[in-house]
Image (tube, rainbow, N blue to C red):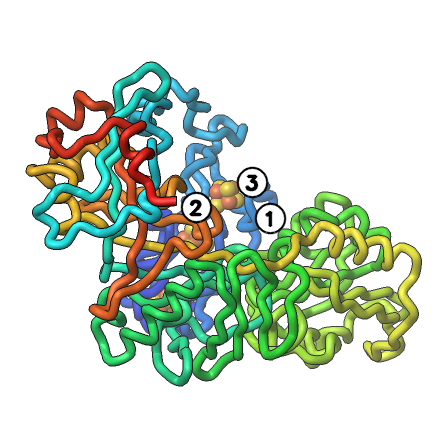
Amino acid sequence: MKILPDRCTACGKCVANCPLECVALVDRVAVISPECVDCRVCLRVCPEGAVAEELPADDPRITCGSCPVACRVPEGGTGACQRYANRGGTLVRNAPLRTFEDVRQVVGPDWEPAVREPLVTGIGAGTTYPDCRPAPVIVRGVSQGVDVVTVVTETPLSYSSVKVKIDTDANLGQEGAAVLAGGEKIGHVTTEEYGSKILSLGGANTLTGPHGFRAARVMTALANRERVKLRVEGGSRLEVQAGHAPVVDGKPIGVMRVGCGSATLGLFAPLLLEAADEVVVLDSHLTGLLTEHAAGRYLGATPSGVRLRFRKSTPGRYFGDHGSGWGGTSIQDPREVFAPDGLENVRPGSRILVTETTGQSSAYFRVGAGGALHPEEPTEGVRRAVGAISETCQESRVSVLYCGGTGGSARAGVTRHPIRLTRAVHARKARLTVGGAPAFLLPGGGINFMVDVERVLRGAFSWVPTPALVIPVEYTMRWEDYEAMGGHLEAARPLEEALARRRP
Ligand code: SF4
Ligand code: SF4
Ligand code: SF4
């Protein structure tokens, strides 16, 4: 890597971003040190185009192939991630392989089997209000030979939200865009994760705001696995229901992508290389170019000379854009993916395959004189490769996670010392379940948790117009731990008695 001093404005972006601190400003010009590994970070962040690639002749550095960055690691140095080191001309992982014993203490204890399942669930238990009274159902029984107690309540939680995971590469809208129900803002689009888009709905501020009642109603419906219509501001119209395929702008989404464009190349490179001389896998996150990609190089692919219109991340991997076209990009016609002069250096007669990461749409071309693209019928090899991609895709579905915070007043129904319950939950002594379903506990203060609503009995969620969602909560622990936390021992009933009191 080299600096073009005439262009450098000494802005310092390369200095701030170099992962190995190999750049410094000297007399108001960036200077790169010999420890540089050609990771291209400085080249990508430089706003002035003042960084250029330069490969020295007889380069003694070792190229790392453990990720697409392909660092060239000098003797005694490490790659950009500092995980691989060049020691005496050999590239090694510079940390030992750890056993579970090595990390057991850091991972911490799990719940013992006797307290993993509640004796009864909170569904149908009723609510304690005000919370200073004992919880409505406190049951003592024996589980796996251990004296245990389960304390249950149907608790109203205004610290409530719902995360909706929608498996699709379709563009739903900008991250941060408002999510509307009946024209009212009840949440927003958050991150994109793997092959899914995530919505966050509700939360304390939305529930207590002007659209709180609508938010509570929609969240409850989603948690009870009902179908809900939503709209993303500036984006798509959605129909979502936990466990079912999403409908985006009236179109049911059949499959989710197998991975990004780069991952698809990594998975199917041998088949793709048999099918064509060059393959472009179109994807809004990373669009892949086979012969330049590590997978193509590994298989000995001949560089095709194709250039794409997208911005390069690392060799063979290009950042896509977002739109209503192929692979969730703005590209409506696969020919648009090539740079304006991106086919000029391609050998006439070359075969180019362009496909989505789902394999749902694909096109096959032969390059003519001057880089003209002529569509051709897909060959058997093309069909086999695209078929392998689509067969590997999973069905799209909507998943709903209910997220709540139950570290508040409801703890008083469990114990006279609420902080002891919080500590017992985090110490894995008291198990929190929601309608019997395991809850994932968020670390840190309070009792914040997430639960997969498909593991909770349909209809178990409701709402009260404070507004708050009402959810069944159970805490199960050893009787001796319940005694130690100052639990409401006098309110505990034997399991048989509690069950006998149930109304039919
Ligand atoms: S980012 Fe570019 S312009 Fe800024 S200091 Fe580095 S080389 Fe110079
Ligand atoms: S290529 Fe990477 S290691 Fe080298 S100077 Fe630039 S950012 Fe630093
Ligand atoms: S794994 Fe680390 S050292 Fe290897 S190429 Fe990637 S960033 Fe560089």
Q: CA distance from mark 2 to mark 1?
A: 22 Å
Side (left or right) of 376 relative to 212: right
Q: Residues within 10 Å of mark 3 (few under 14, many from 20)?
A: few
- Measuring 24% from the left and 68% from the top, which residue is drawn there? 467
* Location of mark 2 (residue): 80
Provide the secondary structure element on which disc 1 rests: loop
Q: Is residue 372 above or below residue 90?
A: below
Residue 57 is tagged as: 1
Residue under the point 73% across and 75% down: 334
State whether residue 60 appears in this view.
no
Task: Kindly check if marks 1 and 3 are in contact, taking CB atoms under 8 A apart as contact.
Answer: no
Q: Quadrant of residue 101?
A: top left
Q: Nearer the viewer, residue 61 or 167?
A: 167
Which kind of residue does numbered mark 1 sit on?
A: Ala
Secondary structure found at label 2: loop
Q: Nearer the viewer, residue 350 or 502?
A: 502
- Describe residue 134's horizontal placement relative to residue 281 as left or right: left
Question: Where 204 falls versus 34 (above or below)?
Answer: below
- Foreground disc of the pair 1, 3: 3
Which residue is at the front of the view, 205 or 72?
A: 205
Q: x, y percentage for residue 23?
A: 35, 55
- Residue on which the image places disc 3: 66
How far apart are labels 3 and 2 at the CA level? 11 Å
